[in-house]
Image (cartoon, rainbow, N blue to C red):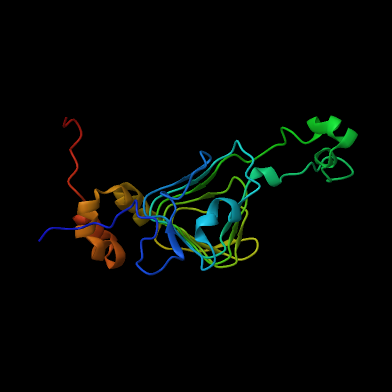
Amino acid sequence: MPLHPADPTRLHPIPGQPRVVLLKPLLTSPLIEAGEFTYYDDPDDPTAFETKNVLYHYGPEKLVIGKFCALGEGVRFLMNGANHRMDGPSTFPFPIMGGSWAEHADLITGLPGRGDTVVGNDVWIGYGALVMPGVRIGHGAIVASGSVVVDDVPDYGVVGGNPARLLRRRFGDADVARLLALAWWDWPLEHLTAHIRTVMSGSVDALEAAAPDRPHPGTP
């Protein structure tokens, strides 16, 4: 029986549900990347993700999101453009108000940043979570609804709260290493399609057994 993988280029992947969009075919900014099948869910206007959910994105830092990520309604990414000076008596950005104040633009340019914001593969970010600039969220992580993520999240970590703290790990260190080596999100779509049940509900052992054949070291 032939396998028919889902279409990663389809903007609205769920028939009759315009509230869900795949980000990869939606994005236009060169500063935002998303992998295949990563989706955003919003009943109002999910297609406005680049302006409503990625805030103060004046560059050059990027927002990079991996494959197979689920982003709940209201998830926001605060970028480095929101930064203000904190080394003087006032944090107010006077030069942006214009007039002769604009002559002091050097006071608000080149502020220190934390670099790109990076979300791994297979990450679930719950309703209303806020991700701060420069944060790295590891593969397989879960961010609880309403969390404010100010620090990096480890692979397969579950975080929650304001500020978000590590609540638990989904797997032990040995299994996390195996999962990262298996990287099921990079499997060919036809092979992944044949093993959806294992990916969703199987053990790490079962996932390892289902992995596509890989060449041995030294094999061309």
Q: Is residue 30 above or below residue 199?
A: above
Instruction: Please say if 204 is above or below 64.
Output: below
Q: Nearer the viewer, residue 27 or 203?
A: 27
Q: Nearer the viewer, residue 161 or 174?
A: 161
The image quarter containing residue 217 is top left
Tell me which residue sits at (60%, 67%) in the image: 146
Where is residue 51 shown, x and y percent of the image?
Answer: 59, 51
Apparent side of residue 213 relative to residue 177 in the rendered image (left or right):
left
User: Residue 92: x and y, percent?
Assistant: 84, 46
Rendered residue at 19%/49% (across/down): 212
Residue 129 location (% of width, % of height) = 58, 62
**Residue at x 28% of width, y 58% of height:** 6
Q: Nearer the viewer, residue 167 or 9?
A: 9
Outermost residue toward the left?
1
Work out whether residue 62 or residue 7 is closer to the camera in this orientation and state it. 7
Q: Is residue 28 above or below residue 107?
A: below
